Amino acid sequence: MTTIAIIGAGPLGRWLALATARAGYRVFLEDVMPSNLHHAQEYLRQQHGPPQTDSAHGQVTFVSTVEDAVREADLVIDCVPDELESKLEILWLLDRMAPPRTVIATPTAALSIADLAACTYRPEKCIAIAADPRALSGQTPGSAIRLVTIERTAPEAVACVESFWRRLGFVPTLEQASG
């Protein structure tokens, strides 16, 4: 796994793009709002200086369409609001635009991964990051990250997401959704 797509360049998406690039991944950061992408570019510049002096900044590609973000993605993480309608819409788009191999991870504090995954053609490749998306960017390396799966979750999908978080310096813990 080498390519990560992050959907949404708000505070969580910006933080995650920087942490992901620092971990050595190729990152595509997408947002439909040009101002969010501009803020993300400024955030990376403030954190690490001009692009030519920072290898992490050079690993982030800013794109304005979901299709461009997920085209080569091994893993996609959405950073859209933790609201049912928003999550269903983005998972529907990701499911249809990402290659079949792509794993989808979604941060959520309140929504059921079983319900969200059931709305895709790849429920076995959907995993929840059980955290309030607003608080997730406040986590520090060494912190535990709870991953929630469903009974049908493929072992390769679990391995992909666990490996990603470990490489970022976090400690993934697994739990299976009830029901």
Image (cartoon, rainbow, N blue to C red):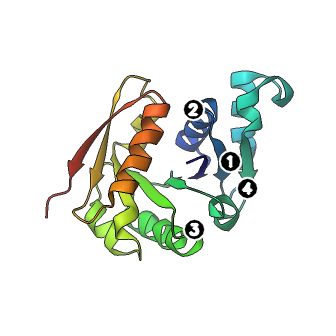
Q: How many marks?
A: 4
Q: Position of residue 130 (x, y in %)?
A: 31, 46
Image quarter (top left, top right, bottom left or bottom right) of the C terminus: bottom left
The amino acid type of the residue labelled 1 equals Asn
Whether 4 is drawn above or below 25: the answer is: below
Between the C-alphas of marks 4 and 1, the distance is: 11 Å
Q: Are marks 4 and 2 in contact (CB under 8 Å)?
A: no
Residue bearing the label numbered 1: 36
Residue bearing the label numbered 3: 98
Tag 3 secondary structure: loop
Q: Nearer the viewer, mark 2 or mark 3?
A: 3
The amino acid type of the residue labelled 4 equals Val
Q: Nearer the viewer, mark 1 or mark 3?
A: 3
Task: Tell me the crowding category of disc 2: few under 14, some 14 to 19, or many 20 or more residues within 10 angstroms, Cα based.
Answer: some
Residue bearing the label numbered 4: 63
Left or right side of 86 for 179: left
Between the C-alphas of marks 3 and 4, the distance is: 15 Å
Q: Looking at this view, name the residue that lies furthest to the left.
A: 179
Residue bearing the label numbered 2: 19
Decide which of tag 2 and tag 3 comes sooner along the chain.
Answer: 2
Q: Position of residue 178 (x, y in %)?
A: 14, 58
